[in-house]
Image (cartoon, helix red, strand yellow):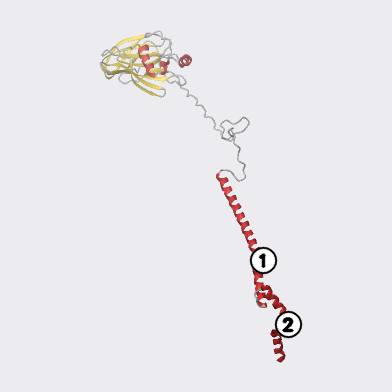
Amino acid sequence: MEVGEGSQAQGYGEADPSSRAPYSSARCSSGGGLPPLLSARHQEAEMTQTGPNQHPDQDRLRRMRIAVVVAIATVVALVAVLAVVLLRDSGSEPGATPPSPSTTPSATASTTPTPGTPSSTPTTSPTPTPTPTVRAFAYQPLWPFTSSAQAAAWQRSYRSGGHQPWHLDAGQTALSFTTGFLGFTEIDRVVSRLIRGDEARIGVGYQTGEGSGVGTAAVLHLVKIGQGLDAPWEVVGTVDSTFSLLRPRYGATVMSPLTVGGRITGVDESIRIDVRQPSSSRPIGTSCCVPAGGDHQAWSARVTFSGATDPALTIVASTGGHLQGVERFTITAAHPGSTS
């Protein structure tokens, strides 16, 4: 025990250079006079925070550099994203070279492709021109033409020099037939008109007295004959109501003498029969006069004719005498027989 006490007193009371040197060195290096155990723990804590052989200022510098690099990378990424958005909005793909301006229209915008260069514009097949409808003439031509060939000859004359344009007017054709071909000059006006396609019904008549009163003498049936838009009008018959000519039947072949007949509504009527053809200025046969009257009453007459040379004959029945010579008329078509 004495030995132990003496050793303890030696360690704290006398200055042993070998035993005091580490403590003195620690005090001098720390400048704070920390005990050796505390000094060692302090150094270990500093090494844990900054790492061995690393100064705190260097650590802060390294962190600043890392922050700068991250910031630069972020800015670059944002710029790249913005560039992609702008390029898409402008209609171009990223990396595509914008087309250079040109004053020559491109193939897709051109309606006339460059020869030898296929156009990307879809071509539309031209609309075919409609073929004119071929008219089959189902009636007997009476006036002004006796055949489709005559009508075609007039069309050529009209196209070359504009001759006789009235053939294209159904009303004028009907009136010319009445006053010119039939010779009924008192029937001098068109009083009704109905045109549907290639057929027309034209009423011709006369003034009945003072004022605007008119009487209808007949309703003529006209049909376009020939082909093309400039096909002329042809008189083929009448549309009858109170005065009709039923015998011979329409288009029949007839010979002289000829029995004709029909029905009439009227009072004190006097019926005249004429047989006409376009090549003759006067009737080639006449019969006058047959008294008739009543309500839808039958009438008949017998007529002789000669000199029939045209392919068609117009048989005309007329009556009048109340207000003027001819007040009503009706017609039919016939073919002359070989002995006519």
Q: Is residue 308 above or below residue 223?
A: above
With 207 as the anchor, is 135 left or right in this view? right
Q: Secondary structure at mark 1?
A: loop
Q: Label 2 neighbourhood size at 10 Å, few (<14), some (14-19), many (20+)?
A: few
Residue at image mark 2: 16
Q: Callout 2, which amino acid?
A: Asp
Q: Is residue 22 above or below residue 236?
A: below
Q: In the image, 221: left or right of 80? A: left
Q: Quadrant of the C terminus?
A: top left
Q: Where's the N terminus, which quadrant? A: bottom right
Whether residue 93 is situated above or below residue 16 in the rendered picture: above
Choose the circle earlier in sequence order: 1 or 2.
2
Left or right: 21 with respect to 307?
right
Q: Residues within 10 Å of mark 1 (few under 14, many from 20)?
A: few
**Residue 315 appears at what percent x and percent y?**
36, 14
Answer left or right for 203 relative to 53.
left
Front in this rendered view, residue 213 or 304: 213
Task: Determine the residue positioned at 33% across, 10% down.
Answer: 287
Q: Is residue 19 above or below residue 251?
A: below
Foreground mark, 1 or 2, reads 2
Question: Image point 68% across, 73% down: which residue?
Answer: 29
Inspect this view and state whether residue 314 appears. yes
Q: Which mark is residue 154?
A: none
Give the camera-side residue of 174 and 28.
Answer: 28
Could you say which disc has been placed on residue 55 in the image?
1
Q: Residue 140, can we see it? A: no
Q: Residue furthest right?
A: 18
